[in-house]
């Protein structure tokens, strides 16, 4: 099976999740391409598609929603799954938070019905304040090479989801 794992990311967190999903599926014997949504030229050659986006302002990134809108006809005819990645403090990840996540991806599900959906939390670097502008200053420092973003993502949760997803994509 030829599978596309595509993503929209601002800080690299979503790209890291996509890469992990791709490695798991390759390890299960699938032919997998992992690439940003902006580089996808077409979907016809793929048997299944997995799309992921960073969540900012409680919505998927604009380019991710544009990808879904542009391709929803093709995506309805293929096994399709989604994942979301958001910077969220651990103390905010309770039951109400998990219920809110479903609202964030409702616009995606309104266009295409995924066989599976996952959410992965990516917490800000320790010492990065949640004050307005602090995350932007931190990202700028990473881009300039002054600061290094540590991998705080819950990437271990990606593996079991991808393994279960593999069965659903067949």
Image (spheres, grey):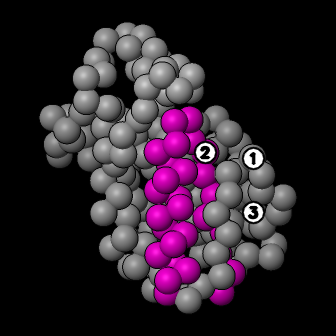
Circles 1, 3 touching at the beta carbon (< 8 Å): no
In the image, residue 12 lies at what x, y percent? 52, 43
The reply to whether callout 1 and callout 2 are in contact (CB within 8 Å) is yes
Which is closer to the viewer, label 1 or label 3?
Answer: 1
The quarter of the displayed image where residue 74 is located:
bottom right
Question: In what quadrant of the picture does the C terminus appear?
Answer: bottom right
Read off the residue under disc 3. 73
Mark 3 or mark 2: which is in front? Answer: 2
- Tell me if residue 1 can be seen: yes
Find residue 119 and name its label.
none
Which residue is disc 1 drawn over?
38
For the point 48% across and 22% down, which residue is it? 146
Q: Which residues are magenta?
A: 1-28
Crowd band around label 2 with a 10 angstrom C-alpha radius: few (<14), some (14–19), many (20+): many
Q: Secondary structure at mark 3?
A: helix
- Regarding mark 2 in the picture, which secondary structure is present there? strand
Q: What is the x, y in percent for residue 14? A: 50, 48
Q: Residue at x 43, y 32 (%)?
A: 148
Q: Is residue 152 left or right of residue 106?
A: left
CA gap, disc 3 to disc 2?
A: 20 Å
Query: Does any portion of residue 112 appear in the rendered image?
Result: no
Give me the residue at 45% from left, 15% from top.
137
- Disc 2 target residue: 8
């Amino acid at each position: 099976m030829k599978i596309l794992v595509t993503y929209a990311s601002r800080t690299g967190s979503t790209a890291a999740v996509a890469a992990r999903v791709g490695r798991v599926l390759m390890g299960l014997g699938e032919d997998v391409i992992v690439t940003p949504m902006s580089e996808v030229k077409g979907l016809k050659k793929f048997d299944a598609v997995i799309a992921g986006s960073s969540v900012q302002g409680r919505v998927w990134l604009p380019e991710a929603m544009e990808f879904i809108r542009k391709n929803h006809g093709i995506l309805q005819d293929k096994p399709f799954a989604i994942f979301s990645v958001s910077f969220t403090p651990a103390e905010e990840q309770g039951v109400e938070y998990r219920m809110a996540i479903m609202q964030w991806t409702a616009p995606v599900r309104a266009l295409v019905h995924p066989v599976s959906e996952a959410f992965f939390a990516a917490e800000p670097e320790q010492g990065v304040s949640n004050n307005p502008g602090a995350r932007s200053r931190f990202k700028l420092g990473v881009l300039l090479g002054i600061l290094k973003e540590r991998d705080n993502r819950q990437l271990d949760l990606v593996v079991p989801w991808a393994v279960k997803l593999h069965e659903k994509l067949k």
